[in-house]
Image (tube, rainbow, N blue to C red):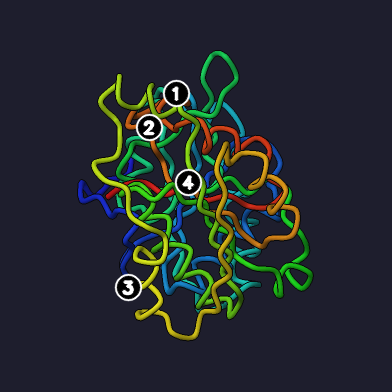
Amino acid sequence: MKPELSTDLVTSQWSADGAVVVCIDGSPLRPDVITWASEFAHRHSLWLRIVFAAPTAADPNTSASPTGLFMEAIQIAESVSPDLRIRTDLISGGNTAILTALTAEAALIVDPLIFTPQGDLAAPGPTCSFAKVGTPRESNGAAALPVVVGLDGSAHSECALAIAFKEAEAANTELVVVHATPPEGELSRDFASGHAPQHSTPLTWQLSGWATLYPCVAIRQIEFDGPSVAILEQLSTEARLLVVGRRGRGSFDDAGLGTTSSAMIRKAHCPVIIASEA
């Protein structure tokens, strides 16, 4: 029987009732991903939702049983914090159905398992932020590293800033703000598709309100003209987390992510959060 799921969506402006959703399937667990998701949930007072995602509607008992994997994942999560609120769910169906179900109650989805036929990551819908962990560093080594956020001066940046400031404050670390002017070709494509930003905000003005809300966060600014992919990839080698906004508005495909965010989930050397526009 499929679990009953809330139909309420929690956007990336998460509350204490939101969940960090981490996916498992019949393959061996990745303890680093479970640990990262658990640490993030603990820092931000969120609960952890561990989902066994079965890619077909067939009886999941005919494949690997989720019971042992659930128990293993719970042990890893509780080793991060014994007080962490944890829920387990089993969801089956096609790619779109699974991603829709994962979005319910989610503040953040960690390492979605669903891929397109071309092998590209299929992103959750535009109301939900998601994280690509990759191979994170040891927690102790990453503790002193900064949070990096990539901005383009538009409304798409606000959600990324919200997440980046919250993480920098929770981790007691520096925030590196990278402000880039998108290439002319990318802006032209945005205007042609109707996804262009409504306005462009000077960086100092854009940061002033957030700096007031988070006075303890040290901010370092980097501004330049040109493509942001190269500099963000470079900075990610010395970052605990990279946050970028989601310029695209598609729902369940990689094309909906935008040029920079699509590149970063493949090239970044640290965990990445793709911040959705609320």
Q: Which residue is mark 2?
A: 248
> Residue placed at 59% from the left, 33% from the top?
263
Q: Earlier in the sequence, mark 2 or mark 4?
A: 2
Residue 255 tag number:
1
Q: Is residue 232 above or below residue 252?
A: below
Q: Residue furthest top?
A: 117
Closest to the observer, 157 or 33: 157
In this picture, residue 14 sits left or right of residue 142: left
Q: Work out how far the residue at label 1 is from the one at label 2, CA to CA, in angstroms.
A: 7 Å
- Which amino acid, by three-letter code, is at mark 4? Ile
Q: Amino acid at mark 3?
A: Gly
In the figure, is residue 144 to the left or right of 117?
right
**Mark identifier at residue 214:** none
Going from N to C along the chain, the mark reached first, 4 or 1, is 1
The residue under label 2 is which amino acid type?
A: Gly
Q: Residues within 10 Å of mark 4 (few under 14, many from 20)?
A: many
Q: Quadrant of residue 12?
A: bottom left
- Residue 73 position within the rendered picture, expressed as x and y whole percent measured from the top left: 61, 56
Q: Nearer the viewer, mark 4 or mark 3?
A: 3
Q: Position of residue 203 (x, y in %)?
A: 41, 60
Q: Earlier in the sequence, mark 2 or mark 3?
A: 3
Q: CA distance from mark 3 to mark 1?
A: 32 Å
In the picture, measured across the screen, residue 92 lies left or right of residue 243, that is: left
Looking at the rendered structure, the secondary structure element under dot 4 is strand
Q: Residues within 10 Å of mark 1 (few under 14, many from 20)?
A: some
Q: How far apart in space, not on screen, are marks 2 and 3 (Cα)?
A: 25 Å
Residue under the point 62% across and 56% down? 34
